Amino acid sequence: MLFRSMTALANVRSQDVPGSLSGGLLLEPDGLRFNMPATLTVAGKDAAGVPFVLTGRNDGSAVEVANMDAPAVASISHFSTVYLTWAEQEQIMEQMYQKLNESEKALFQQAKVLLKNPNLAVPVPPSIPLECTSEADAKAYAELLKEFMVEAYQPEGELIGRLLAIKRGKALLGREQELVLTLENRLMTRMVKKVRLLMKTYYGQEEKLNAVGTLAMKVAKDVQILDPGSEVLFAEEIKDWSESLIDKMLEEIRTQHDYRKVSAVWKMGYWASLLGSQRSWAEEIQAKLERVLQFQMRLNWEMGIEGESRYVVEGEFPIGFHSKKAIGPGLTGSGKAKMLSAEFESDEDWWVEAPPIHVEAIITGFDVCGLKANLTINRFFPREENHFTLDSDGEVMEIGPMPLMEIAWNAVYDYRKHTGPSWYEDGEASDQYTFELNLRNKDVIAVSDMDEVVQPGETGTLLSWFTVEMTHTPK
C-alpha cells in the first residue's frame, strides 16, 4: 500500500480513546476511497490486553472500532485517522464493549431503513467480451469489473461487513454470545434480489455474462458463508446462460467468419460443465466445430531463374478441424498439386513433365486471439521431373530427369525444413516445412499470405513466391 502522506498525531485527547493508546496516524488524503477494501496491519511492541484498531477524527474525538479481521488487523475502505489501543482492564474492556454496542445500534438503524426501501441500487454491468482481448484491454476490463463489484455490493455489503466486524470485536473481548445473523441474512437477501434483477434484465446478452456471472457467484458464496445450510444459488441460471450462447457464437463463426469466437465457445462449454451441465459439451462442441471450421486451401508456388525460367505449381484441397485425429488441436487436409507450367526463355521448345504431387497439410498453433497460425506441409515439389526438347528435325528428344524444382525448393526453404513425427503416416518420421500465417478475422478469406525469396547465385538469381490462401467454407 502506498500512502501519499502518513502523519504521526500529536495533541490527541487520549481520554476520548478507550484503553491504553499506543499512537495514531493520519493517512492522507483524508477520505480517499479504495476500489476494494485494503488491509491495515499494525505491528510493534506488544502491550498487555487485546489490541484494537480505531478510527475517528485526528484530535481523538468521534472514535469508533474499525472493521477488524483479527487483533491489530483491520479492513479500511478509505484514508482516515487510525489509532491502536489496548484493552487490558475489565473496566476498559467494558468501555470498549459499550463502544461496539453503540456502533452496532447505529448500524441496526441504518440497516432497518435500507430494508424498508423497496428500491434496489443496481449498477449497469460493464460490457466485457467473452472472446480473446489484448493484454491492455484485459486489464481495463478487469478494472471495470472490480468497480462494478464494489458498486453492486453497496450499501448492503458494507453494512454486512461492519456488523460482522463488531461481532468479531465482541468475541475478541471474550464476550460469549449466540451468533445470530438475522439482519445480515436479510441484507444478503437484498443482494440476491439484485442479482436476480440483473439476470432478468441482461439474460442472454453475451457481453454481460462475465460481470453478472462473477457477481452472482460471489453473492452465492457469501450466502453460503452466512448460512451454510442454504441451497447453492445461481448455478443453474449461469449454466443455462452459458449454454444458450454456444450455438449463437458458433453461428457467428459460420456466417460472420468471427474466428475469435472459437475460444469463447470453449469457455462457455467449460463454464456450463463446471456448473453441472448434463450435456457432454466437449464432444458436442468438437462435433460442431468440425462443421464450422472448414476451409478450402489453395497453395501456389512460382519459381525460376530470373530472365531464364519460370515454373508454376498449384494445389487446392479442403482443410478443416477433425477431432477424431490424434494430433492435438489443429486443422488437417490433403490433396493433389500439379505443375501448371514450365517456361524457358532461352529455348521455347524445352518443356517439362512431372506427376501430381501428394500434399499433406496441417495447421497448428491456430491462435485465434493473436491471429497467427503455422502451416506445415510434407513437400510441394514432384519426386520426378523429366525434361524434353525438339531436335533439329523436330522430333521429341528426352533429356531425362532433372529435379530442378526439388533443388530450388530446398535452396529457398531449407531453413524451414525439420524432421518430426508425421501426422499422416501413423507417427513415422518425415521431412516437413513450416510457414507462419496471419489470420484475417471476420473475413471469408481467412488467410492470404505470400512468402517471397530473392536468392542470388552463381547461375543467376533464384526467385520464389509461395502463396497460401484459405477460404472459409463452413457446412
Image (cartoon, rainbow, N blue to C red):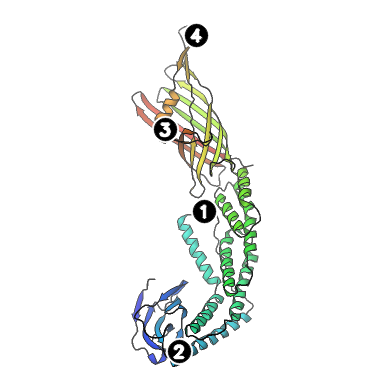
Can you say whether 322 is above or below 461 in the image? below
Q: CA distance from mark 1 to mark 3?
A: 33 Å
Left or right: 80, with 238 as reference point: left
User: Quick one: quadrant of the N terminus?
Assistant: bottom left
- The disc, 4 or 1, on the residue closer to the chain's N-terminal end is 1
Please name whichever residue, 394 or 107, is drawn nearer the observer in this view of the structure.
107
* Circle 1/circle 3 CB separation < 8 Å: no
- The disc, 4 or 3, on the residue closer to the chain's N-terminal end is 4
Q: CA distance from mark 4 to mark 2?
A: 118 Å
* Circle 4/circle 2 CB separation < 8 Å: no
Q: Callout 1: 10 Å neighbours few (<14), some, many (20+)?
A: some
Residue where numbered disc 2 is placed: 93
Amino acid type at image mark 1: Cys
Percent across and percent down for residue 466 are 46, 33
* Circle 1/circle 2 CB separation < 8 Å: no
Q: CA distance from mark 1 to mark 2?
A: 56 Å
Can you say whether 89 is above or below 419 in the image? below
Residue where numbered disc 4 is placed: 395
Residue where numbered disc 1 is placed: 132
- The disc, 4 or 2, on the residue closer to the chain's N-terminal end is 2
Please name whichever residue, 171 or 368, is drawn nearer the observer in this view of the structure.
171
Residue where numbered disc 3 is placed: 413
Q: Nearer the viewer, mark 4 or mark 3?
A: 3
Q: Nearer the viewer, mark 4 or mark 1?
A: 1
